[in-house]
Image (tube, grey):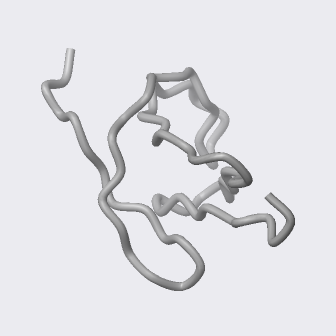
């Protein structure tokens, strides 16, 4: 298991450190399953994962 506790994510065009909330099995661009870290989200945020890209993007809901 990995000892990593934080990761870098892109939030509204700015990089931030976020705590890793959990690990999930996700398919990569070749269809292989990988155990990937999932960052902690704040209220009103949505995680955007694009296949083939390593960077997570977090989108903030203006109402949230």
Relative image position of residue 6 (x, y in whole percent): 25, 44
The image quadrant where one finds the N terminus is top left
- Residue drawn 46% across the image and 58% down it: 54
Relative image position of residue 32 (x, y in whole percent): 58, 30
Q: Is residue 51 above or below residue 6?
A: below
Residue lying farthest to the top in this orientation: 1
Residue lying farthest to the right in this orientation: 63
Relative image position of residue 9 (x, y in whole percent): 43, 62
In front of the other: 64 or 2: 64
Classify residue 29 as left or right of residue 34: right
- Residue drawn 45% across the image and 23% down it: 23
Residue lying farthest to the bottom in this orientation: 13
The image quadrant where one finds the C terminus is bottom right
Relative image position of residue 37 (x, y in whole percent): 42, 34
- Residue drawn 61% across the image and 61% down it: 58
Q: Is residue 25 above or below residue 26?
A: above
In front of the other: 43 or 46: 43
- Residue drawn 38% across the image and 75% down it: 15
In which quadrant of the rendered view does residue 20 lie?
A: top left
């Amino acid at each position: 298991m990995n000892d990593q506790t934080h990761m870098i994510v892109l939030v509204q065009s700015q990089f931030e450190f976020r705590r890793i909330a959990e690990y999930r099995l996700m398919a990569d661009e070749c269809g292989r399953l990988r155990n990937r870290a999932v960052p902690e989200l704040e209220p009103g945020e949505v995680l955007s994962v694009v296949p083939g890209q390593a960077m997570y993007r977090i989108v903030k809901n203006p109402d949230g």
